[in-house]
Image (cartoon, grey):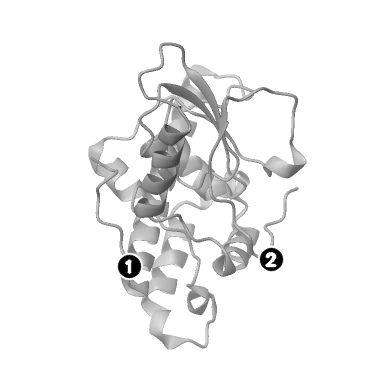
Amino acid sequence: DYNTMETPITKSARLQSNLEAIETLFALKSAEIDIRQKFNINKLDNRNHIYANKESLEKLSKYTGFGGLSGFFNDSNKDFDKERDKFNEIIRKYSHLDNEFNFNSLKTQLELSSDNAYYTPTYIINSINEITKKLGIASNNEEKLEILEPSAGIGRFINNCDLNANFTAYELDKITADILKFIQPNTNVINKNYLSDIKEAKYDLVIGNPPYGANNLTDK
């Protein structure tokens, strides 16, 4: 059960889990590219055509983002030399994914997120779920609800939601959005800034916990 899985807390544990998740993601994306090339899948088809197994899902689900980990990006901080070496090793190993992730800017994008990329704790999500119940939004609704998550992360709200619902999930960070696609393969994941991609759509519920930092990821 990925909802109750222990989330890494210390900086060292978080970095280790993040790097394992990134490496797992890159391995899955490599396999996905192979499948697309083998079967000549249309580039406009943005679905995944492979699925993560249990071991991969466990690693992906422990990704916590880089909020509070700015020291990792400071080369003069020797505390994280081992982790930086591992990160660079992963980039070299999957250099063929450069067109997909733009490795020249990847580290900068992750560093910009280190001020505000904090994922919502489960107890807060549970409290919000209780509020939805008090509002009369029940889990036994016969028709599926349409729910928007405008800042989805790796899908903590979606993973902990017991409503009968279809989710549309926006996530600006490329790595996080791709992780979410594997964790929640039936969710409509959009790798864009919701505020710059607002479309005319009707939702029964909007739920989430958007970042409030001043440093924004670039959306090009």
* Mark drawn on residue 219: none
Name the residue rendered at 49%, 64% in the picture: 66
Q: Residues within 10 Å of mark 1 (few under 14, many from 20)?
A: few
Q: Residue at x 36, y 46 (%)?
A: 126
Residue 215's tag is 2
Give left or right: position of 218 versus 124: right
Mark 2 is on which residue type?
Asn
Q: Please give the name of the residue rendered at 52% of the width and 53% of the height, measured from the top-left corner.
A: 95
- Circle 2 packing at 10 Å, graded few (<14), some (14-19), many (20+), is few
52 versus 40 height, above or below: below
Hey, which quadrant is residue 155 in on the image? top left
* Residue 94 image point, x, y percent: 46, 51
- Mark 2 and mark 1: span between their CA atoms? 23 Å
Look at the image and tell me in which quarter the N terminus lies.
top left
Give the image location of residue 27, x and y in percent. Answer: 39, 44
Q: What residue is disc 1 on?
A: 9
Looking at this view, is 125 or 40 the one in front?
125
Image height of 103 relative to 24, above or below:
below
Rendering coords of residue 87 (x, y %)? 44, 65
Q: Is residue 83 left or right of residue 72?
A: left
Dot 2 falls on a residue whose secondary structure is: loop
* Along the line of sight, the residue nearer the viewer: 92 or 44: 44
Foreground pick, 113 / 89: 113
Looking at the image, residue 143 sits to the left or right of residue 10; the answer is: right
| Badge 2 or badge 1: first in the primary sequence | 1
Is residue 119 in view? yes
Residue 31 seen by the camera:
no
Q: What's the amino acid at mark 1?
A: Ile
Q: Are marks 2 and 1 in contact (CB under 8 Å)?
A: no
| In the rendered image, the vertical position of residue 193 relative to residue 16, given as above or below | above
